[in-house]
Image (cartoon, grey):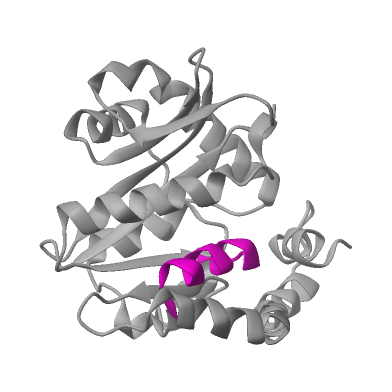
Amino acid sequence: MDNQEIIIRVANSGDSHYAETITNEMEQSAKARGTGIAKRSPEYVANKMNEGKAVIALTKDGTWVGFCYIETWSHGAFVANSGLIVSPAFRKSGVAKQIKERIFKLSRQLYPEAKIFGLTTGLAVMKINSDLGYEPVTYSELTQDEEFWSGCKSCVNFDILTSKERKNCMCTAMLYDPKDHYEPEETKQYFEENKKGFERLLRFKEWKLLKPFLRKDKEDKGGGESKAKRFLQYFFHL
């Protein structure tokens, strides 16, 4: 698929027929990773397209490649670039980074004063964010909008989030503040210099936050595959 020209642009109402394909792939991808995301309906995704608050990637012949959309919180004070998804056939091609760059640019155009944030469990997404000027932050620096946090209920890590009173979880929080930020060259360099440390931190956090759930599973007499076991299989390939 690398030889196909990919067009990345702002989505519009004419792209709404891709909405169901996109939401189906979001759901399948979350299941494959053993994690969860805030579930969105095809109608919700189509509405983002209609509003011009989404970016879509397509081949010249109209094959769907990838997608991402904008959500606003706290009366527009915070913006999240959500639902980043790439078709399996086009993954590891660099298109995810291009989509993130385009949706970031669109967010800055539509909401120039807003803080742009994201939550991720992946080092690759942390690198993409760092290249754009995002910095790792504590959860307290994110929106406290209840509607945003309620979106985490569909994630398998939600019990951890609530047990930590929304102060910590598997995800790393990253933020771009237009009024107070380092330049992308600086955040990119910082990430590269500390990449191994970030990777170790992610692993340690996963192990540390899982301990109470491992203990609970050991005491649990019920059958079936435990949540902690699924976490371990995903993060540590056990």
User: Magenta span has 121?
Assistant: yes
Q: Nearer the viewer, residue 217 or 94?
A: 94
**Image position of 93 (left or right of 46):** right
Residue 82: image location, x then y, percent: 39, 51
Image: 52 above or below 209: above
Residue 101: image location, x then y, percent: 42, 53
The outermost residue toward the left is 75
The outermost residue toward the top is 61
Taking the spot 66% from the left edge, 42% from the top edge, the residue there is: 93
Taking the spot 70% from the left edge, 75% from the top edge, the residue there is: 216
Residue 6: image location, x then y, percent: 52, 29
**Image position of 100 (left or right of 219):** left
Quadrant the N terminus occupies: top right
**One can see residue 61 in this view:** yes
Taking the spot 43% from the left edge, 80% from the top edge, the residue there is: 135
Image: 61 above or below 162: above
Taking the spot 69% from the left edge, 31% from the top edge, the residue there is: 2
Span of residues in magenta? 120-135
The outermost residue toward the right is 238
Residue 174 picture quarter: bottom left
Residue 181 picture quarter: bottom left
Secondary structure mostly seen in magenta is helix
Residue 39: image location, x then y, percent: 42, 42
